[in-house]
Amino acid sequence: MKVLVIGAGNMGLTYATSIGESKMLNGRDLLIMDAAPDKVKSLEKIDYFDVYDRIENCIDKADVVLIAVKPYHSAALFESIKDLVRQDQLFVSLMAGVTIKTIQEALGVKKVIRTMPNLPAQVGKGVTSFTSAPEVSQVELDVVKKLLDTTGVSLLVKDERTIDASTGISGSGPAYVFYFMQSMMDAALDMEFSPEEAKMLVQQTFEGAIELFNQSNLSPEEWMSRVASKGGTTQAALDSMENNKVKELIKEAAFAAFNRAEEIGR
Ligand SMILES: NC(=O)C1=CN([C@@H]2O[C@H](COP(=O)(O)OP(=O)(O)OC[C@H]3O[C@@H](n4cnc5c(N)ncnc54)[C@H](OP(=O)(O)O)[C@@H]3O)[C@@H](O)[C@H]2O)C=CC1
Ligand SMILES: O=C(O)[C@@H]1CCC=N1
């Protein structure tokens, strides 16, 4: 089996590297293609894959094609490959919003899997939701699951609406966590900690909280009550968040991402 990754950015290069490191494929069965000459040059220094700068030189070799360009580049990409693709090839999209039907119609193919990965894939801690067109066989789904799992864990979901919902939770989610981290660092700076101290306090607080959560069956709410003493400091902070409806605002933000994914699809 030969796998081609189109687009060597955040996600494409992460997937190509993880698949390469996993040794799932034999020899030179992993291919990567990007249109930017400087990127191609830097990719050539990596040993896991064969690098291409022209789609017509590689698309024909692939059994599985991972599409990892930005959604707004997808139409141009589809136009450039529609006469080069084959019905037996399996297309796996990592793009937010772009629907299976759009890909099928633009390429004139049937076998399409749609995924929603996330950036922690770069450190093997990603979570990727995926769903497929009915024309994809169970064996093909199993193979793709193995490819996705090289970057962390994966979740087969029932339909594309759930892929868009995953975008609102796990796809965009790392940015919400970074938003929270940045806000806490900004607060620490206002309290006159140095940038290094602010980073250290926030980093270790996140790491410690996640570790506690991972090593227990307690819900976040139960952990919150273990931190908060009655009438104490944490309760003051939690009350402030409740009064300011922070939970509702976070939900609203997640739904904004979900809705935007659906909107891109339309
Ligand atoms: N970043 C994230 O956290 C997540 C991203 N995604 C999805 O993954 C996809 C990729 O995102 P990301 O990796 O961040 O984007 P990047 O911009 O980092 O990577 C896309 C790469 O594709 C290249 N490219 C554009 N057009 C073509 C083409 N026709 N042929 C070959 N290469 C091309 C781009 O080159 P150039 O820079 O020159 O345009 C760029 O190197 C998106 O569709 C996004 O929705 C999904 C979940 C999470
Ligand atoms: O922001 C985006 O559109 C992409 C999809 C999920 C994360 N990044």
Image: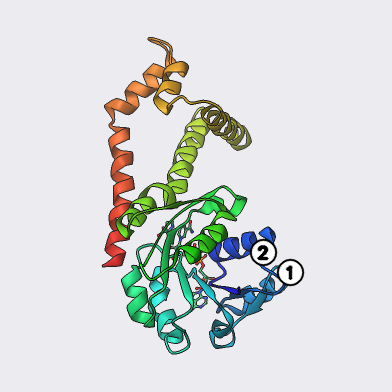
Amino acid of disc 1: Asp
Determine the residue positioned at 65% across, 62% down.
Answer: 24
Q: Left or right of 132: which side holds 127?
A: right
On the image, the x and y values in percent for residue 184 come to 48, 34
Which residue in the rendered view is the most extreme toward the top?
Answer: 230
On the image, the x and y values in percent for residue 228 come to 43, 16
Amino acid of disc 2: Gly
Viewer-side residue, 241 vs 87: 87
On the image, the x and y values in percent for residue 218 come to 46, 24
Q: Which residue is mark 2?
A: 20
Front label number (1 vs 2): 2
Q: Left or right of 59: which side holds 95?
A: left
Question: Circle 1 sits in a helix, a strand or a loop, which is it?
Answer: loop
**Quadrant holding the N terminus:** bottom right
Residue 14 sits in quarter: bottom right
Determine the residue positioned at 27% across, 62% down.
Answer: 263
- Distance from the alpha carbon under mark 1 to that under mark 2: 9 Å
Give the mark nearest the N terminus, 1 or 2.
Answer: 2
On the image, the x and y values in percent for residue 85 come to 47, 84
Residue 248 sits in quarter: top left
Q: Left or right of 233: which side holds 195?
A: right
CB under 8 Å between callouts 1 and 2?
yes
Q: Is residue 68 above or below residue 35?
A: above
Q: Which mark is residue 104?
A: none
Q: Which mark is residue 47?
A: 1
Determine the residue positioned at 42% across, 18% down.
Answer: 225
Q: Is residue 145 above or below residue 54?
A: above
